[in-house]
Amino acid sequence: MKKRVISLVLAMALSMSMFMLVGCNDAEKKLQKQIDELNALLTEQAGKITELETSKTEQAGKIAELESSKAEQAGKIESLETENQALKEQVEDFEYERKVKEAVVFELSDSTEFERVYRDLK
């Protein structure tokens, strides 16, 4: 009878051990599934990070191009302003020459008018 009780206890212990092993195996499978899902999410996030870094690099390139273009435009503007100033000076010179010529014509026609124009030129 002792042997039977011992056998029965051993059988129950073996049963419980098997049940626990099956339970542990199920828990391990669930944990592995969760680990796989997390790894998939990490891979997806790594892909998105790579895309964002690529986009950031592209944007930096575009910004550099725009800054270069801005510098070129600033150079063109400066050149045009210099040219504009030279043209203004030419116009002033032409205006002065025109007034001098008018003064000469007025001098020939009326000396008082010449004096007025001459004073205006000063």
Image (cartoon, grey):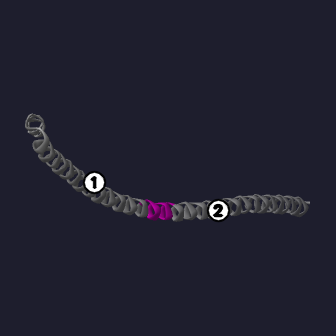
Q: Quadrant of the N terminus?
A: bottom right
Could you say which quadrant of the image residue 17 lies in? bottom right
Is 26 situated above or below 95? Answer: below
Q: Main secondary structure of the magenta part?
A: helix
Is 102 situated above or below 81? Answer: above
Q: CA distance from mark 2 to mark 1?
A: 59 Å
The residue drawn where x is 61% and y is 59% is: 45
| Near-viewer residue (44 or 17) | 44
Question: Quick one: SS at disc 2?
Answer: helix
Residue position for label 1:
84
Percent from the top left, x then y, of residue 37?
A: 70, 60
Percent from the top left, x then y, of residue 68?
A: 37, 63
Question: Quick one: SS at disc 1?
Answer: helix
In the image, which disc is placed on residue 44? 2
How would you rate the neighbour count of disc 2 (Cα within 10 Å): few for under 14, some for 14-19, many for 20 or more? few
Task: Tell me the kind of residue under disc 2.
Answer: Glu
The residue drawn where x is 60% and y is 61% is: 48
| Near-viewer residue (64 or 19) | 64
Mark positioned earlier in the residue sequence (2 or 1): 2
From the viewer's perspective, tell me whether residue 115 is left or right of residue 75.
Answer: left
Task: State the extent of the magenta-drawn residues as a range.
Answer: 56-63
